[in-house]
Amino acid sequence: MRSSTLAFLLLPLLALSLAYYVQSHNSPLGPAPHLGVSLGVPLTLSGLASLAQAAAARVRSAATLAAVHPDVIYNNAHHYLVNVPVPKIQWPAVVQQWIPDLGLGSSVVIQQKPTTSSGLPALTLGPFEPLEVDPNREEFRRRIVAVGDIHGDVLNAYKILQTAGVVNEEGNWTGEVDMFVQTGDIIDRGDDTIILFKWFEDLRVEAEAVGGRVISHMGNHEWMNVIGDWRYVLPTEIQTFETVQKRFEALTTGWLGEAWAANYTVTSRIPLHPSLGPPNTDYPAPPASPHAHANNAGPLSHAAFSFVHGGLAPQYPALAPFPSAINELGASLLRKLRFRRPLPRPHPPYGYPGLPAGTTPEEARLYGGDGPLWYRGWAELPDAVVCKQVDGVLEKTGTRRMVMGHTPNFEGIRSRCDGKIIIIDTGISHAYGGAISALSVEYKLVPLQKGGWKEQEVVKAIYAEKEEEVLVMASRDVDGDDFW
Ligand SMILES: *[C@@H]1O[C@H](CO)[C@@H](O)[C@H](O)[C@H]1NC(C)=O
Ligand SMILES: *[C@@H]1O[C@H](CO)[C@@H](O)[C@H](O)[C@H]1NC(C)=O
């Protein structure tokens, strides 16, 4: 009975009955009296059939990706009970993905129900209330795209930036996204260091000309290179700089070191909404700051993401204020490294130069195993540990999700603890042959007739060579008439 074939036959019917339910709920005649029995009826409603077919197609692909095959086992006018034989961590996103396809907006309540008589866990969707939008206030939208470790592969970087809508065919900024974030490790394992860093500086200027932003981070590999730890530098890549000497100059006092000092940080706090200030506005904001109101009570106080290469470890001492405490350590350590004289000779063949004389203990810890550049705990520790630790770090950093690279998963982007931890290193470079991926964040505040806003957030993994996957779909009501 619960073969996937049967599930796929039932899915379009579910989609149709959902569509019909909404349609009838909005109609002056009230809710349909006997949904499920009259599944033939919606087929006659103009426009609904194609909508439902599109939705069913989406459900099918989402279900395949997450290896979840839901069956409809019961519905009445208010609830749809759905059986999920293979509950994977991402099931709520898959279930919720039906809803916007059917034009339901985000006003859906998802509850975990007790195990059904079939012995399988079941979920209840509903009841649905259509969004009542206030036509007199403007909706707010922001789209952010983030890409992890690129490791010297400009072709794959270009593929994913184009797929995600960041650049067009010519590699120019499209203006379709508000922010493009890269979490470090552009360098090493490939030859395209120069072209990648120059391209990102061009994109930064193009983006800013139309109100966009490019947000860049140094990964542990950028730091290794400026330190003189060149173990992962290919000889062919050195040739692109001509000589070892010229390369070391470029990435210390030359153009690349200058770009790192001017336009790269260790971590960042990226707001979903402008009331939190521009990117990298500190949390908590100093009392005199115009953003201080968002520190505690503000409904959007944590409507931000953190980005970093390795991870913000719970025990790491410089988490607050975030992100300036970390980024100030990064800036001072980078300065010391760039202006060492004489410059050390790179390892190998010479010995490991280490951090320069005058490095403070705080700067050394920044580059340590539990520092933001190297930490792997969020990727490697079990759910029971990380899901308990994550809220404390989000609270301290004024964020709702943390995004990082560094620990590759070649199959795709990993979302843990309901998307509070998102790991975007998928081994994009041909050096690994992993999934060519980007993270997409779509944020919306929809003005409601009754006052306040409906906040909607969709976080997706986008792939150049396979179908996208919804990782998080969240929504809530937010009080307040005007945030900007
Ligand atoms: C597009 O990119 C090219 C190459 O980086 C650059 O020369 C050109 O100025 C860009 N065009 C625009 C409109 O920014
Ligand atoms: C840093 O970015 C700005 C644009 O924000 C650009 O004008 C500048 O040239 C960049 N600096 C370096 C050293 O690349």
Image: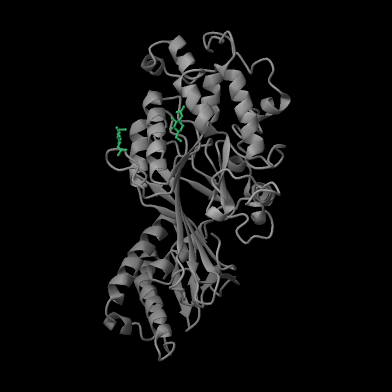
Quadrant hosting residue 363: top right
Residue 335 seen in the figure: yes
Instruction: Where is residue 461? Give x, y as percent.
Output: 44, 50
Quadrant hosting residue 477: bottom right
Name the quarter where the N terminus is drawn: bottom left
Instruction: Where is residue 49? Give x, y as percent.
Output: 29, 75
The colour scheme of the drawn protein is: one colour
Image point (45%, 24%), residue name: 188
Instruction: Where is residue 122? Give x, y as percent.
Output: 54, 70
Number of numbered callouts drawn: 0
Residue toward you, 286 or 173: 286
Residue toward you, 312 or 379: 312
241 shown above or below 48: above
39 shown above or below 354: below
Q: Is residue 402 left or right of residue 205?
A: right
Residue toward you, 211 or 230: 211
Image point (68%, 40%), residue name: 319
Image point (51%, 29%), residue name: 262
Image point (36%, 42%), residue name: 160
Instruction: Where is residue 35? Give x, y as percent.
Output: 41, 84
Residue toward you, 6 or 398: 398
185 shown above or below 463: above
Q: Is residue 210 left or right of residue 75?
A: left
Q: Is residue 96 left or right of residue 304?
A: left
Residue 420 seen in the figure: no
